[in-house]
Amino acid sequence: MSRTLMMTAVVGGLLATAAAAPAQVGTRYETYTATAANLSVGSGEALRINVFRWSTDDERQKALSALGEKGDKGLPGALASVPSAGYLWTTEPLGYTLRYAYKQALPAGGERVILLTDRRLGSWSRVPWKAAAAPDAGDEAFTLIELRLNRAGIGEGKMSLATKVAADHAAGTIALDNYDAAPILLKNVKHEPGRNRPR
C-alpha cells in the first residue's frame, strides 16, 4: 500500500471512530438570580449564582464542626480546601467562589438553598456590602446566603450581613440564625432550569 493510501485509510478510520462516539455531555448545573435590596451598600446589585455541585455529607459535617468549635470565623478555614461548588456573580469584575452549597426540599413544596462565598460580597470593589437595618452586623470574611423558593422557583433571600450563622442540626447544615426574623436582602429570586456545564 502506498503512503498516500495508508494515510487516507488512517484518517478515514479516525473520522469514522469520532462519528460513532457519543457526544460528550457536560454535567448539569443550577442557576439562581436575584436583586440585592435593603442594603446601605450594594442595594440594587444583580446577582447570578451558578451551582455546579452540592456539598457532600463530609463537607457539611466539616462546616458544622468548625462552627461549633470556632464560631463563624472558623468556616473559611475549614472549607478553604474543598472543591468549588460554583460561583456567584455581581457587577464586580470577578466572581465569588462558593465553598458550600446545600439544597433542601420544603414540606409545602419549593426549596431551601444555602450558599457560602469565600469572601464577603463587595470585597472585589473594596466596598463591603452592608445591611441597612444592621450596618455593623456580619463583618466576617464571607457571606452566607439562604434562599427560600416556592414550587414555581420564585422567592426571596437573606444573608449573614444582617444576622448570625447557626447550626441547623435537624437538616444537617449551617444556616442563618432565626431566618424568619432576619430582613429580606435578596428579592426577585428565581431558579432557572438546569443547564449543561461545558467540560
Image (spheres, grey):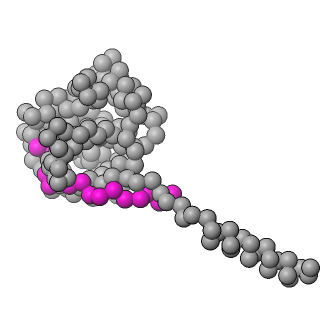
Q: Position of residue 5 (x, y in %)?
A: 85, 82
Q: Position of residue 151 (x, y in %)?
A: 17, 50
Q: Residue furthest right?
A: 1
Residue at (42% x, 28% y) in the render:
58
Residue at (54% x, 61% y) in the render:
24
Majority secondary structure in the magenta region: strand
Q: Nearer the viewer, residue 99 or 112?
A: 112
Please identify the quadrant where the N terminus is shown: bottom right
Residue at (85% x, 77% y) in the render:
6
* Residue 13 within the magenta-colored segment of the rendering: no
Q: Position of residue 120 (x, y in %)?
A: 28, 41
Q: Position of residue 182 (x, y in %)?
A: 10, 35
Please give left or right for residue 59 compared with residue 31 in the image.
Answer: right
The magenta-colored residue range is 184-199
Query: Is 7 situated above or below 35?
Result: below
Query: Is 146 situated above or below 20?
Result: above
Q: Residue furthest front?
A: 20
Q: Nearer the viewer, residue 133 or 106?
A: 106
Quadrant of res 185: top left
The total number of labels drawn is 0
Please give left or right for residue 126 compared with residue 131 in the image.
Answer: right
Please give left or right for residue 54 compared with residue 105 in the image.
Answer: right
Residue 119 visible in the displayed image: no
Q: Nearer the viewer, residue 82 or 80?
A: 82
Residue 102 visible in the displayed image: yes
Residue at (49% x, 60% y) in the render:
25
